[in-house]
Every structure is written in structure tokens, then in C-alpha cells.
Amino acid sequence: MDAREAWRRTLLEWEAVKHYHQPYALIIGWTFRNPLIEHVLPSVTLVKAVAVFDEAIEEYIDSYHGGLPSGYRATLDGRIRFLADRALVLNGSQLHQVRDLRNRVAHERDAHATWQELESALGELETALIALNLVQARPQLNYFGERSGIAFSDQPGVLGTRTFTIGVRENGSAAYEATWTQTLHRLDPNASGLD
């Protein structure tokens, strides 16, 4: 997958995950934020986004500069230093801050990223990728969630089914979706609910 498509996928996933709580409204009529998910999800998304960024700039340096010259380590730190030293990116210090946050999240037991830190990091990574002409400006991304009406069933014990679809629209068109079907069972009027 090329850098442009990998970054596009990262942005679509980010838009979807930051709305992870919204599907509850389709099912139970209200939303809630899960503290465990709030603690873990931004960190996981950050680590993945930085990995996509690192792979993209490594390929860029190899393709356009024949690899890193001596004096630069073949690490994310070395690649950021190379790009900043040559003024190919103008936000080198911010990229190092993103790298430091990723390192803390990945290697320190109690470290985690917040949604705000993730959003800021994605902006810095994207700014560098645009400067390198690896991606274009971010498209308009919008989360959506839909629930079908109940499709009634003649199956014994089953009232019907309904389908849920959540996803992200990119410039108005669905670009990232997840769909599942819920089966609604009839209550057994003879069941006491007690074992």
C-alpha cells in the first residue's frame, strides 16, 4: 500500500474510532464513554499512525535521496533529523515530540495518549507528509451511524432483525463502514425468568 492510501486509511480509522461511543445511541438510545477504551484507544491509534508515517518517510528518503547518509541512524529519530536538517519539513521539533510521545506510550507501563494529544500528533504528521508531497490536504471526513427498521420474521422465537451500519464518509461518500445484524428474540410468556 502506498503512503497516500496508508495515510488515508489511518485518517478514516481515526475518524471512526474517535466516535466509538456513538453506536450505543443506535442500540440503546444514549451514548457513554468507556473509561478503559478512553485510556487505550488514542494510544493504539497513535502508535499505528506513527508507524504509517515512519514507513512513508523511510520510503521517501530511500526513493528520493538514496537512503540516509552516514551520520544518521536508520530510525525514526534519524529520519526526522535528516528531513529537518535539509528543511524538507519545517516542523521537525514537533515531529520529535510526537516520536517521544509514541515512545512513552509504547515503552512505559503507565503512559498513554489523550484524544487531544492524538489529534495534535496527527496534524503534525500530516503537515510533514504534505510538505513531502506524499499526501494531499485532508478530505472532509464525517462519521455516520444508521439503523434499519425491524424486518419481522416468521421464524419461531424470533421477532425480527435489524441492521446497523456505522462508518465514515469522505467528501460525502461512504469510505469506511462496519455493518452488523441484531436478532430480536420473542419473550417466552411461559418463562419465569428464574432458574
Image (cartoon, helix red, strand yellow):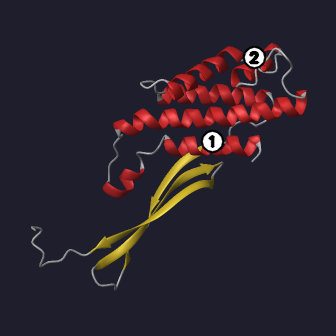
User: What amino acid is labelled 2 in the image?
Assistant: Arg
Horizontal relation, residue 100 to residue 89: left or right: left
Q: Is residue 84 above or below residue 58?
A: above
Residue 145: x %, y % from top left: 47, 54
| Quadrant containing the C terminus in the rendered view | bottom left
Q: Can see residue 150?
A: no
Q: Is residue 71 above or below residue 136?
A: above
Residue at image position (79%, 20%) is 83
Whichever of callouts 1 and 2 sits on the residue coming sooner in the sequence is: 1
Residue 126: x %, y % from top left: 69, 31
The residue beneath circle 2 is 81
Tell me the element at label 2: helix
The residue beneath circle 1 is 10
Residue at image position (57%, 45%) is 13
- 1 or 2: mark nearer the eye: 2
Mark 1 vs mark 2, CA separation in Å: 24 Å
User: What amino acid is labelled 1 in the image?
Assistant: Thr
